[in-house]
Image (cartoon, coloured by chain):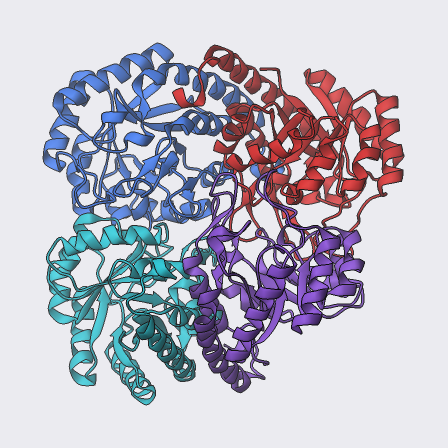
Chain colours: A blue, B red, C purple, D cyan
C-alpha cells in the first residue's frame, strides 16, 4: 500500500516554455507536500466535441517538448496515445502511456499501447462497468506487459453528465492492478457547452478526497495556472493555486486509509 | 463544523430485548470510539418489495420499545414515519423523525413530519436531483421548524441499482442544512433478489469513508449483530462486529476534513 | 387484443365549467376518431416541486365536479388518490382509480386503492424496474381485486430527466395485466424549471406512437385547451387542438399492431 | 419521406459461401415484403469484450467476399471501418461505410471515413446525447461529403444495459440527416455474459416497431440463420425466420407514419 502518486499537468501542451514552467511549478508544489509527481500533458486532443477546437502541437513537436520537460525539470512524464501506430514512438520518450476512455474496447489499440513495455494507464470508458475492466487489462497483459494501471473517470449518467460510482474503485482494484482516479475529467459535462464540453471544477476536490478515502494508488488531475483562459477543458481543470492545500488534505486522508488497509490486509473484499 | 454523528441500529424493531441489547452494544462501541450515537430502528416497513415481507411490530408497540431504549440505555432515538397521522404520536416519543425517500415529494406528509418541531431527517428520493432538496426543505421549514437534516441514500442508476453521486453531498449542503449520508441503503439493489431488495454490504465502508472525506454532518448505517439472518435488509446491513474499526477510520477522516473546512470557511463552493 | 383506450383530460380540475367543457370537447374528438375515452383530472396535486404551487380544489369539491362530468357528459372518469383514507370516497364516485408513481411501493396505500373493487391504474415509480411491477400488482390483487392496470411514465435518467424504455411495456405485459402508457408525464423534466417541473411536449406524439406500435391497452395523456397558461404541468401537456390528428395516427398504428398480435397469439415473448 | 430501408446481415463475415447464402436469403425476403435492402457484415470485430473472441476474416479477405456478394447477389453492401487507414480501401468496394459507436468522437477517423465520398452511417456513441450528433455530422460534412446518416444504437443505462430514448430519433433528425435505428445492438447488454456481451433478442421487434412509428429513414438489424450458434452477437441477433413477419409490420407502420409526416411537413418539431 504505497502512498498515492499524483499525475497532473495542463490538458494540452501549449508550448515549450509553458510546459517547462508548469512542470517546474508542479514539482515544487509536490515536493512541498511530499507527493510523487508524474507530469501529464497531451500532444493532440483527438476527440474534441467540435471540428474547430484546438488540438495541440501534434505528436512530433509534443514529444520533443515532453522530452525536455523530463530532462530539464527532472520529472517522469505521461501522455496519451490515440492510434496504434503512435505507441512505439511515444513509448521511446515518456515514462508512462495513457489510453483514452473512448478507446478502451479497441483490442488492437490497447495491445499496441502495452506492447512497448512501458506502464500504461488505461482509462475506463464512460460506458464500461468497473468489473469489465479486468478483461480490458487482460488484453493488455496478453502482450506480456503487466505494468497496467486502471483509471476511473466517470460513467454516463443521463445526457451530458457523468457520475463517479465510488464502488467501482474497489471493484477495479480486485483485478490486482493499481487504480488511478481522474478527478478532473470526472466532473466533465460532455457537450454541455454546445460546441465544447462543460464541467464543474467546484467538485474536483470533493471527488478527489472521496476517492482517496476509498483507497487508490494515485490521483490524476488536470491543473492549469489559468483554467478560464485555457485552450481546452477549462471548465473542469483545477487552478494551480488550489493544488497545494488540496494535496495536503489528500495526503492526510491517504495516510489514514493506507494504514487501515495495512491492518485489513489478508481480508478480501468478500469478508467486509 | 461539528464532529460527525452516527445514526445506527437494526433495520426493524425485532422485539424489546433485541432493541435494548443492540442499543446498548452500539452505545458501548460509540463511546469507545468517541462518536455521538442516535439509535435508529423502524416500527413498520411500509414499502417492502413483496406483500409477504416482515413489516415490524407496528407503531404502538414500536414506540413503547423505543421509549424504553431511550430511557434505559440512555441514547437519543430516531424512527421513520410513513403517514401524516403518525407524526404527532411519534414525535412525542422520539428525539428525531425520519421520512422515507419515496415520500420526499408529498407536501402534506413532509409538513406533518416537521410540524411537531422535532428534528427531521428527510431522505432524498432515488429520483430527485440533489439541488431539488432545497425546495423539499423549504416545504418543511414553512411549518416553522428549521431543525431539518437532508439525507442522501443513492439515486436510480439503471434498473435495480443505485449510485451515490458524491457531488450531491456538497450541493445539498449549499442549502445550509446539515447533510447525513446513509451508507447502507445506498448499496441496496432494489428488487434484485426477486421478492426482496438485494444489496452489497462490501461497499458500505467504501461509501461511508468517501462521504466523510467529502464532508458530512453524520453517517447513517443499519447495523445488525447477524445480518444474514435479519428479517429485512440483510444484504445491505453492516455486521455489528465490523462497526468499531470502521468508525475509527471515519472519525480520523472526519477530523481531517473538518479541520480543512475550518480553514476554508469564508470560502464558498463557488470559490473552489 | 382490444383497441386502445384513451385516458385524457387536464392535469388538475380547474372548476366545474372548465371540467364539463373539456370533457365534452374530448368526448367529441374521441367519437370523431372512434376511440374509447376515460376522462382524467386530479382534485389535488399532492407532490408538487414547491410549497407554493397550485394544488386543486381538494377531494370533496373535486369529486362533486367529477360526478357531474360523469353524469352530464356521459363519460367514465378516473382520478388519482394520494392517501389510503381517500380511496373509499373516491371509489364511490369514479369509474377507475389511479395511484401516483412515487407511492407504488407503499403496501397499505396500494391495497387501500384496490380494496373498493374499482379498476386501479397503478403508475410505475420512476425508480422501479418494469419486472418489479408484477409484485406491486400482486399486492393489489391480494385484496381480491384483479381489475389492475399497470402504467409506464418514465424512469429516472440522470438528473431532472426521464427516459421511456419501450422494452418495459412488454415486460410489464408479461404480468398478464393491461398496460397503459402515460405519454405526457413521460416527457417531464422533474424540477428542471427551478420551482416547477419542466417538460417537452414536442415528444408526446413520438412516445405515444412508439408505445402503441409496441402494443399497449391504452394511452394516457394530459390534454389542455391552453397548456401554456395551465396552473400545472403546462410544459408537458398536449394542446387539445393537436389531439385529433394524433389519435388518428395512434388508431391506425394500434390496428396494425393488434392484428399482428392476434396472429402471434400462442407465441410467448420467449419465442420471439 | 421515403419508405424505410433495411440494413441487415450477419454480425460478422463467416465465409464466402455463408455470405452469399445469407445475402440471397435476405434479398428474397425483402423483395417479398417490398423493402430496400443493404447487406451488412463486418470483416473485423475490433472491440470485443475479451481477447479471445472471434474477430472475422480481416479486411482484405472480407472485402473480397463483400465484392462478390455485391456482384453475384446484386445487393448494395455496407461494412464498418475501425481505423483511418482502412477507409479508402473499403470505400472502393462497398456502397456505404459505417463507423463504430465507440469511435464517434475521433475527429480524424470520422473524417477519414467521410472523405472518400461514399455514404457514411455514423453510429452514435453509447455516451453521447442525441443533440451532440449534429457536431459529429459537421465534422464529417467538413470533408465535403454530405452523404451522412446518423444511427441510434442505445445509450448507457446503468451497468451492462442500454436504453433507447425514442425522443433521440427526432432530435437527431433535426440535424437534417437521415436517421437509422439499429434494433439489434440496442438490445445488447454489454459485458453481461462475463467474457462476452449479452443481449435480449425478444425486444428487437418491440424497439424496431417503436422506432418506425416515431419515424426513421431505415432500420438496421443483425440477422442470422442460427443466432444461438453464431460466432458473435448471438444473444441479440434476430433469427432470419422471424424477419419476414416483422418486416410486414414495420412496412405497414412506416406507411402510416410517412403519410402523416407528409401531412405535417411544413410543421417543425417546435410546432408540435
Percent coordinates x, y for residue B190 in the rendering: 62, 50
Percent coordinates x, y for residue C36 in the rendering: 59, 76
The quarter of the picture where residue A235 lies is: top left
Q: Nearer the viewer, residue C272 or B246?
A: C272
Q: Is residue D84 above or below residue A77?
A: below
Q: In the picture, which quadrant includes the C terminus of chain A?
A: top right
Q: Nearer the viewer, residue A226 or B33?
A: A226
Answer left or right for D255 relative to C132. Answer: left
Q: Residue at x 30, y 50 (%)?
A: D132
The quarter of the picture where residue D2 lies is: bottom left
Q: Is residue B244 visible?
A: no
Q: Is residue B247 above or below residue B259?
A: below
Q: Is residue B241 visible?
A: yes
Percent coordinates x, y for residue C63 in the rendering: 73, 59
Answer left or right for D224 relative to B261. Answer: left
Percent coordinates x, y for residue B134 in the rendering: 56, 32
The quarter of the picture where residue D147 lies is: bottom left
Answer left or right for A107 relative to C163. Answer: left
Q: Nearer the viewer, residue B4 or C86?
A: C86
Q: Nearer the viewer, residue A201 or D225?
A: A201
Answer left or right for B92 relative to C54. Answer: right
Q: Residue at x 46, y 56 (%)?
A: D161
Amino acid at each position: 500500500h504505497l502512498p498515492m502518486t499524483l499525475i497532473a499537468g495542463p490538458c494540452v501542451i501549449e508550448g515549450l516554455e509553458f510546459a517547462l514552467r508548469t512542470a517546474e511549478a508542479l514539482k515544487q508544489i509536490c515536493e512541498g507536500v511530499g507527493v510523487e509527481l508524474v507530469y501529464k500533458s497531451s500532444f493532440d486532443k483527438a476527440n474534441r466535441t467540435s471540428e474547430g477546437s484546438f488540438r495541440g502541437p501534434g505528436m512530433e513537436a509534443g514529444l520533443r517538448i515532453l522530452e525536455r520537460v523530463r530532462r530539464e525539470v527532472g520529472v517522469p512524464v505521461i501522455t496519451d496515445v490515440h492510434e496504434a501506430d503512435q505507441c512505439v514512438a511515444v513509448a521511446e520518450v515518456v515514462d508512462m502511456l495513457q489510453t483514452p476512455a473512448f478507446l478502451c474496447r479497441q483490442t488492437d489499440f490497447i495491445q499496441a499501447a502495452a506492447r512497448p513495455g512501458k506502464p500504461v494507464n488505461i482509462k475506463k470508458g464512460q460506458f464500461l462497468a468497473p468489473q469489465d475492466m479486468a478483461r480490458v487489462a487482460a488484453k493488455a497483459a496478453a502482450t506480456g506487459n503487466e505494468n497496467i494501471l486502471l483509471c476511473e473517470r466517470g460513467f454516463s449518467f443521463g445526457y451530458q453528465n457523468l457520475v463517479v460510482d465510488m464502488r467501482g474503485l474497489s471493484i477495479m482494484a480486485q483485478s490486482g492492478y493499481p487504480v488511478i482516479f481522474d478527478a478532473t475529467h470526472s466532473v466533465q459535462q460532455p457537450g454541455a457547452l454546445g460546441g465544447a464540453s462543460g464541467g464543474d471544477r467546484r467538485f474536483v476536490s470533493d471527488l478527489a478526497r472521496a476517492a482517496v478515502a476509498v483507497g487508490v494508488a494515485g490521483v490524476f488531475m488536470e491543473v492549469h495556472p489559468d483554467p478560464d483562459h485555457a485552450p481546452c477543458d477549462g471548465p473542469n481543470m483545477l487552478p494551480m493555486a488550489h493544488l497545494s492545500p488540496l494535496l495536503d488534505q489528500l495526503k492526510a486522508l491517504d495516510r489514514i486509509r493506507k494504514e487501515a488497509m495495512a491492518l485489513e490486509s489478508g481480508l478480501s473484499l468478500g469478508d467486509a
